[in-house]
Amino acid sequence: MRVGGLFFINDNPFLEHASNATAMKFSALWMLGVYTAVMNIGFQFYHRYQVVVKSHLASKRQTFFSFALCLLACGVLCFTVLYTWIPSNENPEYAKELEDDVVVRGRKLPFSVADPRTLRNVIHLMASQVFIVLIYGVVIFCCCRIVKVLGNEASHMSKITRQANKTLNRAMMIQAVFPFILIGLPYMIGLAGTFLQIKSPILAQILTMSITLLPIANATTLLTVIPSYRRRFLSLLGRNRGQFEKATTTPQTKISKISTADMR
């Protein structure tokens, strides 16, 4: 985040001597990962909405093609950076802005710039904002409808199925918050800072590093929210072992039968 725009620096020892074209392609791949992580949250909530609210279970073919279509949209959005971002060798003014950068420190690293002073970059940056807003609009809408159905005691679901759906929905809600905090929010702050021409390279580095915490956050959510995973996780840590063994070895435990209709 600098006066010239949003700088994407390839601070990778394997790319230190790469060409600008190669560096931009790797930056596009990184952006593909970011867009896919955000898109996947909306995709999951939409299909949960179809199952819980609409009672419609999509076939494997429908799921595959719908996910492929969403992934194609992410690919188009990220690989257009090859035609919108400005390579470092096009304007020497960009290189001068990085002379005192704590990351570069005099090194000649390949980088590219999303300069909001050009029309093509404005269109791409705004499209990125709209993409994130639309995805989380889908998440909020689907989540509200799912919560409403699960809270209806007169629904066709049994008590066990409803409780299982509530637990899964809680885990998905937490997993939806993490990408917004670790990816969506940093990206929107970065874009806002770019349009306002705020110079804050340290903040940009912190926000970029926070994105790498997403896989850890998602795994931790599953291990702590889903009861069966939580019991196994605590048993591996040496805690709650007595309760875990008792719960799994008691001969008087009764398992109620759940019909196929309840599982849908």
Image: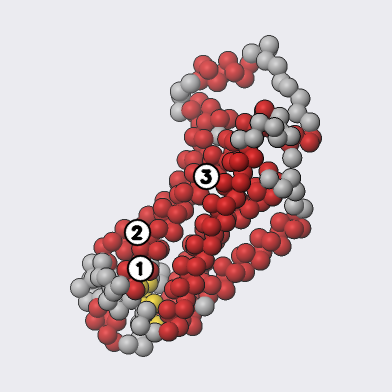
Which residue occupies the foreground of this view, 186 or 192? 192
Residue 185 on image: x %, y %: 40, 58
Q: Quadrant of residue 92?
A: bottom left
> Is residue 59 placed above or below 19 in the rendered structure?
above
Which residue occupies the foreground of this view, 259 or 25? 259
Residue 209 seen: yes
Which residue carries the number 1 mark? 192
Which residue occupies the foreground of this view, 80 or 152? 152
> Is residue 165 placed above or below 82 in the rendered structure?
above
Judge from the rendering whether residue 117 lies leftward or rightward of residue 239; answer left or right.
left
Q: Give the amino acid at mark 2.
A: Leu
Q: Which one is earlier in the sequence, the residue at label 3 or at label 2? A: 3
Local crowd at mark 1 within 10 Å, few (<14), some, or many (≥20)? some
Label disc, if present, on residue 207 of the rendered structure: 2
Label disc, if present, on residue 173 of the rendered structure: 3
**Is disc 1 placed on a helix, strand or loop?**
helix
**Is disc 2 placed on a helix, strand or loop?**
helix
